[in-house]
Image (cartoon, rainbow, N blue to C red):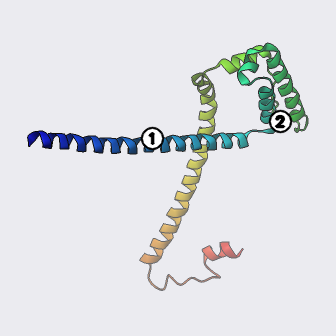
Amino acid sequence: MFDIHKSNLQSDLQFHTSITVTKTHGLVISIDEKINNMNAMIEIVFARMQTPEERKLAAFAEKHGGPERVLDSVGLMKEVLEKQNVATKSDNSGKAKGAPTQTSLTLAEAEKEIRKDVDTILAENTTAFERKFGAIELSLREVNVTIQRQSDRVISTVLAGMQAGPHERIIDKVRSPIFRRWLF
């Protein structure tokens, strides 16, 4: 009797384990599909965010074997830099005087820029970001002070009206300093 119960329990355990494994496999497949869909959506978003110049350069790279081949070939890199410099010059010709101009990169500078790691790029941009963030923070503090002053003024006016008698709550539009500011 014990052997029969033992074999029944083992078969039930195997049955439930196979069901759980099947459900888990289906769940993993659905998660994988969702991740693939998400990656496709991200690619679409980045493709739509590209400028026309970036699209032309990407098409050039694909035509010549992909970005890796262009990065490995000195001649193709020179062509890309020439295309970029021509586009930069045409963009700067329509700008007003005093507008910032983009500088053209040499091959060595471009290779150095491409080889930088993310930490180096972030470190270089940190000071500019902190400066801009500080300016925004300062303007928000000024707005906060203005709002605080205005709310204090309104609250003091309301409190003064509540503490005064009913005869002082009557507002004479001709003699009241508040209405004089609004009328004139």
Q: Amino acid at mark 1?
A: Val
In the rendered image, the vertical position of residue 96 relative to residue 121, given as above or below: below
Q: Amino acid at mark 2?
A: Ala
Q: Nearer the viewer, mark 2 or mark 1?
A: 1
SS type, badge 1: helix
In the rendered image, the vertical position of residue 167 relative to residue 106, given as above or below: below
The C terminus lies in quadrant: bottom right
Q: Badge 1 is on which residue?
A: 28
- What residue is at 61 percent from the left and 44 percent from the top? 136
Q: Residue 142, how many percent across, how many down?
A: 58, 50
Sequence-wise, which precedes: disc 2 or disc 1? 1
Q: Is residue 118 left or right of residue 24?
A: right
Q: Of residues 71 and 26, which is closer to you in this image?
A: 26
SS type, badge 2: loop
Residue lying farthest to the left in this orientation: 1
Q: Is residue 114 left or right of residue 6?
A: right
Q: CA distance from mark 2 to mark 1?
A: 54 Å
Q: Residue 10, how many percent across, how many down?
A: 21, 40
- What residue is at 71 percent from the left and 40 percent from the top? 47
